[in-house]
Amino acid sequence: MDFFKIAQQTQEAYCVRHGIPVSRQFTDEELAPCHEGIADAERELYGVMTTDERLGHLSPVEQAMLDEINTKKLIPFRVSVTVPGRAPEQIGLIAAHACDAVTKAMEIMFPDFDSEKPAGGLAIKVEAIKSTTRRAA
């Protein structure tokens, strides 16, 4: 069997396993070895998963967190950060207010407490993105 056919079977098996629409080219018997390989890889990567976890269903705790996020009025911001000696960086994100946007931008730029921080200071500019700009994007 050639590599291309194995790749096609693996892709189709993955789609079938995860409920992704796909035009079937192979029988379930032909896909059985691929299903086993995918299951082994997922176990190694993610540990033992329930069917709900594999299909992306949220636990009650995760659903509560998502509901909380959805009830907040989040505003899209563009945060521009200029560090001496580096090109300015623009970070697009959503936050409840401008201070939260700055905090999130700093967490993105300096993710670890021990991250090297600029010695010469930095300049931060926060802009709320207007609705007309959002629609155009």
Image (spheres, helix red, strand yellow):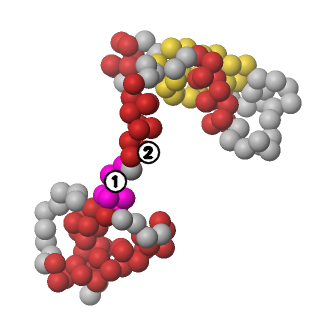
Q: Name the residue under label 1.
A: 56
- Residue 84, percent from left and from top: 78, 26
Q: Name the residue under label 2.
A: 61
Is residue 117 highlighted in magenta?
no
- Residue 87, percent from left and from top: 68, 29
Disc 1 on helix, strand or loop?
loop
Residue found at the very far front of the displayed protein: 60
Q: Is 107 situated left or right of 41 in this image?
A: right
Q: Which of 110 and 83 is in front in this view?
A: 110
Query: Tag 2: residue type?
Result: Val
Of mark 2 and mark 1, the one earlier in the sequence is: 1
Q: Is 7 situated left or right of 125 in this image?
A: left
- Residue 120, percent from left and from top: 85, 26
Q: Is 55 situated left or right of 93 in this image?
A: left
Q: Is 66 situated left or right of 100 in this image?
A: left
Query: Tag 1: residue type?
Result: Gly
* Magenta span: 52-58
Foreground label between 2 and 1: 2
Residue found at the very far right of the displayed protein: 119
Residue drawn at x 60%, y 22% is 100
Residue drawn at x 27%, y 62% is 18
Residue drawn at x 44%, y 30% is 69
